[in-house]
Image: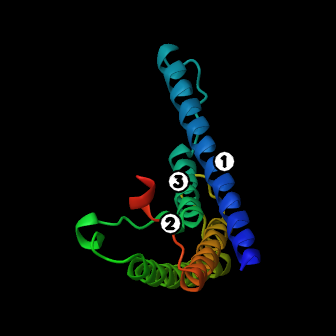
């Protein structure tokens, strides 16, 4: 069991890093796009440098950030409504959280399947992004990789919950 917890924590840290890098790229691209457009406006079109494809870059980085955040914090992802759970025992709450984690595992598998098929189709048919003409294969492939991490972490967390009965309880932490 401790080995699974170490693997899960490592994967969570990896996803936190990927999500952080994605958010930094989003901010840098947005700032540089705004600055170059403003300089273009101030110079009356004399300064003709603008960044192409910023919307694409930001949207794909947002996809990576969201998928990595989902995988990194899957054990904390359930919003528990006090009205429904306040009278339940910790054992029942734990069982429900374990079932949710199994559901997230299944969701991760569905994501992997769909994204992997999309990556194979993109490779076969030469699908590229609209503005930058970048191949969609690595974008779909990386998204599938993040979904694999989601599935693995959900599976590990569900095993942990069913074996130990311990789970992240937002009611207890005050979150």
**Can you name the residue that lies furthest to the top here?**
43
Foreground: disc 3 or disc 2: 2
Residue found 73% across the figure and 64% down from its top:
10
Between residues 63 and 97, which one lies in front from this camera angle? Answer: 97
Vertical relation: 37 (above or below) 175: above
Residue found 58% across the figure and 49% down from its top:
57
Please identify the quadrant where the N terminus is shown: bottom right
- Tell me where residue 146 appears, x and y as whole percent: 63, 69
Between residues 158 and 113, which one lies in front from this camera angle? Answer: 158
Secondary element type, mark 3: helix
Residue 62, disc: 3
- Residue to which mark 1 is pinned: 21
- Tell me where residue 19 appears, x and y as whole percent: 61, 53
Q: Quadrant of residue 128?
A: bottom right
* Separation of marks 1 and 2 at Cα, in angstroms: 26 Å
Between residues 11 and 113, which one lies in front from this camera angle? Answer: 11
- Residue to which mark 2 is pinned: 168
């Amino acid at each position: 069991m401790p080995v699974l917890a170490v693997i899960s924590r490592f994967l969570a840290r990896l996803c936190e890093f990927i999500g952080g890098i994605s958010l930094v790229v989003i901010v840098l691209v947005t700032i540089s796009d705004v600055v170059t457009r403003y300089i273009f406006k101030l110079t009356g079109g004399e300064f003709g440098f603008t960044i192409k494809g910023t919307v694409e870059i930001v949207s794909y980085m947002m996809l990576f950030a969201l998928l990595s955040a989902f995988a990194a914090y899957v054990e904390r992802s359930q919003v528990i409504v006090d009205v429904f759970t306040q009278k339940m025992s910790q054992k029942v709450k734990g069982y429900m959280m374990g079932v949710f984690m199994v559901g997230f595992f299944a969701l991760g598998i569905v994501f992997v399947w769909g994204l992997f098929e999309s990556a194979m189709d993109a490779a076969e048919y030469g699908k590229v992004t609209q503005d930058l003409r970048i191949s969609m294969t690595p974008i779909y492939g990386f998204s599938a990789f993040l979904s694999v991490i989601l599935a693995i972490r959900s599976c590990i967390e569900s095993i942990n919950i069913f074996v130990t009965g311990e789970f992240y309880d937002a009611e207890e932490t005050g979150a």
